[in-house]
């Protein structure tokens, strides 16, 4: 992509807005684009890609650029050292004193830096990973997190099938392929404006990471059942469950956020589903939930979490989350799982999921729950997927990572209520 002083200037100003990291980067960037509406699509793409690349490699860039760590210096270090642009290419953009400094940046060896700098994680997160992973694996995970994510779509099987969607995308010059694991997934390596495409506008596709799609197959709902999506959010997984049920039965989409449930409305309208019932709740012990105790066939708990599995999309999270945030989240996760479990009838299924890579949000929550709820037993996730002809074995728990599966980092546990 062509470099210019104007583009570089906008990337610097956008980064200045984002770097206090008081707000999610995507919200700050949207605001920047609204305030600078003269920027064309290519300018916006350059600014967004540059800003996100800096957030992904912030720790390394601060080390390389030191003692100069202004947003401008971080971007120049990124372009020269990480993206490999030559000093000749960058020269027209540089101030006089930056040339010599950038030469030094390019010469800094990176092989023997501390692990946390090489993997671009904060110290506390690196320490937690070191406790349970060899260094090579942490490096591989970090490399997976340092690439931007492809665009994954889910085919809405109520309105279309995957072959039809792939044929239409090909006809329209959008290179796409079937996802390796999800039977309804399509992967696009480029970033077209898919929300303007007729396939999207007519409800035949939704944007959804392949890992998130697979959670629906762990729930494996059947036609006519009663289901709850306990933390439905904007409803991506709820819509998938509705399609898997062929719009027959009943799904409650519970959430404490009216804003998120409002975002579900247009998606629900496009989807053609008639079995979804969005319900605003005050907390996990709301009376609307208590009324359903012991009545549901399947309950999905996609728990609020640190989001550290989504760093390809949200690299700012690793700098914004703190150890005390994780502690608060784990208390919330345990309380939500316990409340959701009360809805499951004998013989029913409970799926606990997060998009985190931390054991304390994942295995430890499930193990503590099973220790105090002997009426539930763990089912091997690989066995549940195999029954639906999805050949993905990550052991007893469902665990995905970008460097291994090309998806966001996900965790899930499938539990069933014994008689």
Image (cartoon, grey):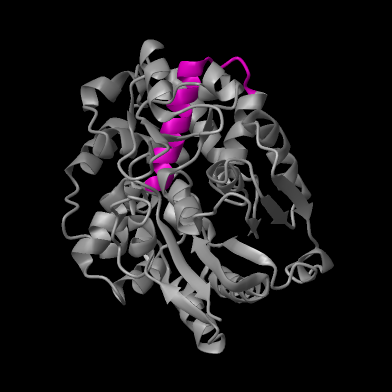
* Residue 239, image quadrant: top right
Q: Is residue 49 magenta?
A: yes
Picture residue at 66% right of the left edge, 65% below the top: 296
Q: Position of residue 282 (x, y in %)?
A: 80, 63
Q: Which residues are magenta?
A: 36-56
Foreground: 314 or 158?
158
Res 114 seen here: no
Picture residue at 33% right of the left edge, 50% below the top: 390
The answer to whether 299 is drawn above or below residue 258 in the figure is below
Q: Position of residue 305 (x, y in %)?
A: 55, 62
Res 31 seen here: yes
Q: Position of residue 285 (x, y in %)?
A: 76, 72
Question: Would residue 241 appear left or right of 139 to someone viewing this image?
Answer: right
Foreground: 277 or 39?
277
Picture residue at 19% right of the left edge, 52% below the top: 110
Q: Position of residue 274 (x, y in %)?
A: 70, 39
The answer to whether 45 is drawn above or below residue 353 in the figure is above
């Amino acid at each position: 992509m062509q470099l210019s002083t104007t583009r570089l200037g906008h990337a610097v100003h956008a980064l200045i807005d984002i770097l206090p990291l008081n707000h999610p980067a995507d919200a700050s960037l949207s605001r920047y684009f609204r305030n600078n509406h003269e920027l064309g699509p290519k300018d916006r793409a350059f600014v967004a890609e540059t800003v996100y690349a800096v957030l992904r490699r912030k720790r390394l860039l601060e080390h390389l650029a030191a003692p100069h760590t202004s947003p401008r210096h971080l971007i120049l270090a990124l372009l020269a050292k990480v993206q490999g642009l030559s000093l000749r290419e960058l020269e027209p953009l540089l101030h006089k004193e930056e040339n010599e400094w950038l030469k030094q940046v390019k010469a800094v060896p990176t092989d023997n830096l501390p692990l946390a700098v090489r993997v671009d994680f904060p110290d506390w997160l690196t320490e937690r990973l070191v406790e349970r992973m060899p260094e090579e694996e942490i490096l591989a995970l970090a490399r997976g997190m340092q690439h931007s994510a492809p665009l994954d779509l889910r085919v809405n099987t109520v309105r279309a099938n995957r072959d039809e969607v792939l044929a239409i995308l090909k006809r329209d010059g959008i290179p796409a392929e079937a996802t390796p694991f999800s039977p309804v997934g399509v992967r696009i390596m480029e970033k077209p404006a898919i929300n303007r495409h007729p396939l999207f506008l007519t409800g035949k596709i939704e944007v959804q990471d392949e890992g998130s799609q697979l959670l629906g197959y762990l729930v494996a709902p059947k036609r006519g059942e009663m289901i709850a999506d306990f933390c439905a959010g904007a409803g991506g997984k709820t819509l998938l469950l509705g399609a898997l049920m062929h719009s027959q039965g009943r799904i409650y989409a519970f959430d404490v956020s009216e804003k998120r449930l409002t975002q579900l409305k247009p998606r629900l309208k496009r989807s053609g589903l008639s079995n979804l019932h969005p319900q605003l709740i005050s907390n996990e012990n709301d009376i609307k939930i208590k009324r359903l105790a012991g009545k549901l066939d399947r309950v999905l708990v996609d728990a609020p979490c640190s989001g550290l599995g989504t760093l390809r999309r949200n690299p700012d999270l690793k700098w914004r989350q703190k150890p005390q945030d994780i502690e608060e989240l784990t208390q919330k996760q345990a309380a939500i799982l316990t409340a959701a479990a009360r809805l499951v009838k004998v013989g029913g299924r409970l799926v606990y999921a997060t998009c985190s890579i931390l054991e304390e949000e994942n295995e430890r929550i499930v193990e503590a729950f099973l220790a105090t709820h002997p009426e539930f037993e763990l089912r091997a996730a690989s066995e549940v997927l195999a029954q639906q002809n999805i050949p993905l074995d990550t052991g007893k728990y469902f665990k995905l990572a970008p460097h291994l599966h090309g998806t966001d980092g996900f965790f899930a546990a499938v539990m069933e209520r014994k008689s």
